[in-house]
Every structure is written in C-alpha cells, then in structure tokens.
Amino acid sequence: MPIYLGLDSSTQSLTAVAIEVDGDRRQVVAERSLRFDEDLPRYGTRNGVLPSDDPLVARSSPRMWAEALDRMLALLAEDGAFPLSELRAIAGSGQQHGSVYLSPEAEEILTRLDPAQPFVEQLADLYARQNAPIWMDSSTTQQCEDITRAIGGEGVLANLTGSRAFERFTGPQIRKYYEEDPDGYDATGRIHLVSSYMATLLAGRHASIDPGDASGMNLMELAHKRWAASALQVTAPNLGDRLPEIRESWTEIGPIGPYWRSRYGYPDGVRVISWSGDNPCSLIGVGLIESGRIAISLGTSDTLFGFMPLPRVDPMGGGHAFGAPTGDYMSLICFKNGSLARERIRERHGLDWDGFSAALASSAPGNGGGILMPWFEAEITPTVLEPGVRRYGLDEGDAARNVRAVVEAQMMSMAIHSRWMGVDVTTIHATGGAARNREILQVMADIHDAEVYQFEVGNSAALGAALRAFHADRMAEGDEIPWTEVVRGFAEPVIDSRIAPDPDRVALYRDLMEVYEAGEAHALRGGDDPAPLIEAFRAKHPG
Ligand code: XUL
C-alpha cells in the first residue's frame, strides 16, 4: 500500500504525518512530533526561539532543525508504524519567511556525508551564518522603509509581490544581514527558506522554492511566479545568484539522499518533493481547494486564510496574497500573538487548559464591554512595534474576564482585518492546537457569524504536506490527478463537529466589534478613548 510522508518544521516542533492511499482506502498511519525545547534542549531555545536581548529580534538554529530531521527519520524507520518499503514520497511544510544562509560548499558537504557518523556533526561547514531569522522577528523596520522607498512606494511593492514590506519577510531580513555583516553575506553561497533548506537536507542537493513560500519574501513577482528583478535589486547586491530557483509546488527535487538510505534503510526510489510554507500546506490540509470558505489556524501564530483563484492584494496593506500549492493563490493575515498570548493569560491566572476553558464558559459573552489588545509581543496585524497589553473597561486581576477578553480580541481582530478579502464567510475550517477547544470555537462562530468545523488530524500543515507528496508522486507518474481527488477522505471536516453561531451573540458581537475598533484606534492612532462606547454597550447589553 503506497505511503506518503508529510513533515512540518514549525516554530516549536517537527511533526510527521504519514498517510496510506490505495483507491478508497485512505488513512493516517503515523503521527509523531518532536518538540525543540524539550527534545533538543542543548540548543537552548524557548518556544523554539533562541534567547535575545532585543525583544524585536527572533532567531532560531538551522542546526537544531537538521538534528530534528535526523531524529525523526530514525524514529520513523525504527518504530514500525509503516513499512519503509512502501514509502513513495516525502514533502514538507516549513514555518514561513525564515532564512538559512549556506556556504558555497553546501552541496558538496551533503554529497560527502558518511552514513556511519551522526548527521549534525558533519554539518559544521554547511552554514555561512549560524542562526536563522524567523517569522517572529520585527527588527527590520528601517530596511522595510528603504526597500519601499527605493522601489517606488508601498503600492508598487504590494502589487508586484503580493504584500507591502513586512518586518518578518525574507527580503528585508536579507537586507539587514547584508548591512550588518557584508562579509557574511559575501561568503553566502545560497540563501534558503526553512522549507527549501529542509528539502535540501533530505535530497542532498539544493532544492527549489515553491511559489507559496516564495511569496512571503517581498521578492517574487506574484503574477508570474518568478524572481522580481527590481525587488532583488533594491534588497541586496547580486541577490539573484544566491537564491534557489522558483518552481511549482509539485516539483520533484530528487530521490532521497544516499545518507538516509544507508543509515536508516529508506528505499532508493523515495521521491523528495518540494516543501512549501506551513500556511500554503495547511490550505491543502483543511481541503480549501476552491473559493467560499476560510480557515483559521490557531497555532504559535494565528492565521486566517482562504483560497483565491486570482491574486487580490489588500489595498490597506495589512494582508498578503500568496501562491497556493495548487498553482492558484491564497489570501492570508497573520497574528503573532496567537497561542503564546493565550498561554500568557492562562499562566498569569494560574490555570491549566481545562481551567482556561471553564473560565471562558463561566464568563458572559461580550464581557460587559471590557476588551483587551493582546499585544504581549510586537504584533504583525495590526502593526504594533511596541509590545504592551492594553485594557479598556477590564480589571487585570479578573481571571475569567481576561480569559474571555483574549479570545474575543483575537477573533474580533481577525474579523476586522480580513474584510479586504471580500469573502462572505459562512463556513470556517478550524485547525491548529487550540482548535481542539470547542469553547474557543464557539466564540469564533459567534464573532464571524459562521459555522465552524473541526478536523480529525490536528496538524493540517503536515497532513497537507503528505497530500502534496501524494499529488506530486501521481503527477510524476503521468497521472494528472485533480485536487478534489487528492484531498478526498483526508482533508474533510468532521460533520458532527459543527458549531453553529448563536444569533443573539452575533448581534452582541457586532456592537462589541465597534468598541474594539475604537480601542485599536485609541491605542495606535490617537483616536478617542472608547469609554463612552463601552458605557453605551453596557446600557444596551446589561447582564
Ligand atoms: C505567516 C507567518 C506565520 C508562520 C508561522 O505569514 O508568518 O504563520 O508561517 O509558522
């Protein structure tokens, strides 16, 4: 029975999902996860990020990701969850935007690996830069301004690449590296994304980047899915020479590298398929292969995204248009204060996750007009570079109301900042760790006035990668398999999991959303204090 493997190299962990596909027989045969902080403690990460004195800087260790890959391949080979001989193809998903700087000898080093020696110990000379800036980094405001000015303004860059300049995007990050360490930049042979770096390690040769992940760089011409010469030019000198090719998401990078075959017994014929970003992979993993529905992923970052047949760019400049693994497009907005913000409130009030849910259930929807802006960290949507939680009509010590306020804030912010997508949302596919929590999903349903569904497999990015491996393997065999057939039986919502919006609460949240927008305007743009609006809300919704 053919097996396909999807790997998700995310901020905090590496997850594997293996699926078996044989006609109508379709099932998940393995799900494994390694957590960076706990399973690879020698790298000293916290929540997958290296310690930093500057709260705007966020980096991680590419060597740690390589060691995680090695451990995962060993684990899957040893634990017998599926016969290795049946494995046909591996694809992957990477946290988006992060960049890895390899030395000019990288490919040679990867072809010379000795299968008798541990993997990471042979990678000492692989890197031109020891750490990798990741998507949580907000330290490149200056570079964003320089790039924007040089290219002719925000609109020009957004129309060309799908997004205005964002601090975490790879172009501004590369420019910062070039400015701060020109020698290091000079000594760099190839700059990979997390996705293409991991595919490179698996295949033992430089992998291409797919349009899904390349669109998170401020460097790709969105309409033509090729490097944008003008964007490369204003970012760093001779950048084109250092970037991998952009090729379709179903590109076969090559067979699995000889190291993995000799060391763990992976069969010769296993295809390594292009990796993509975690959000593009999730799009497939929750079955969004046509317009009309959206997905909300509640993970380290919270993201809201949907399939788009044509590239549509956010005129307000807050959201993104990315490539989709189907060859189409997707819209996306990203919030940095996702699971870590929920966790901060939970910890502050000494609750476990059951206690968090109980607090949510025990507090009144709308919180009597009390709101908070959950900016524990610098925020991406809306742009907040000075972290700090703001509360309006809400006492910091009140556990239940603060739990409710963080969840309501996250959902309202998503609803407000996704208006540009122009989707009349009636159905939401919920994924990510916190999507297991039905109390949170009820708030999601009520605020978005939409039905919410859960999924069998929590890690939609790894599942999406496994499905992409299946699709690419069929394509390589000359079978132009339609996407509806790829996702069938896997990426379908659990019908019984439906959570319906409550009409009274939908109306209440419409009013609360006005309070929230006023709070945001007050906190960020010197707008009026929302206190009178909170009073009016309380008068209209007593109790
Ligand atoms: C998307 C983004 C995050 C990362 C997290 O633009 O920055 O969702 O991909 O893994």
Image: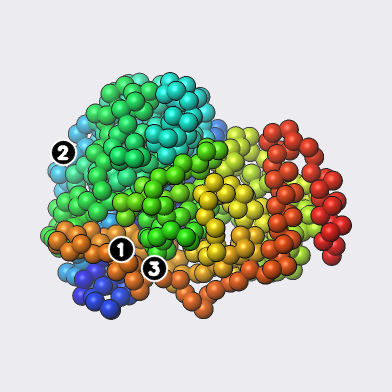
State the residue at coordinates (19%, 34%). Answer: 105
Foreground mark, 3 or 2, reads 3
Q: Does 420 sit left or right of 36 as displayed? A: right
Q: Position of residue 126 (x, y in %)?
A: 26, 37
Is 425 above or below relative to 379?
below
State the residue at coordinates (85%, 62%). Answer: 542
Badge 2: few (under 14), some or many (20 or more) residues near its Cα, within 10 Å?
few
Q: Does 323 sit left or right of 313 as displayed? A: left
The tag on residue 108 is 2
Locate the C terminus by quadrant.
bottom right
On the image, numbered disc 1 is attached to which residue? 483
Label 3 vs 2, first from the N-terminus: 2
Structural distance between the alpha carbons of marks 1 and 3: 11 Å
Nearer to the camera, 8 or 530: 530
On the image, numbered disc 3 is attached to which residue? 491
Q: Quadrant of residue 156?
A: top left
State the residue at coordinates (45%, 35%). Answer: 158
Type of amino acid under label 3: Ala
Residue furthest to the left: 268
Badge 1: few (under 14), some or many (20 or more) residues near its Cα, within 10 Å?
some
Q: Quadrant of residue 263?
A: bottom left
Q: Position of residue 536 (x, y in %)?
A: 84, 52
Q: Quadrant of residue 18?
A: bottom left
Is 268 above or below relative to 328?
below
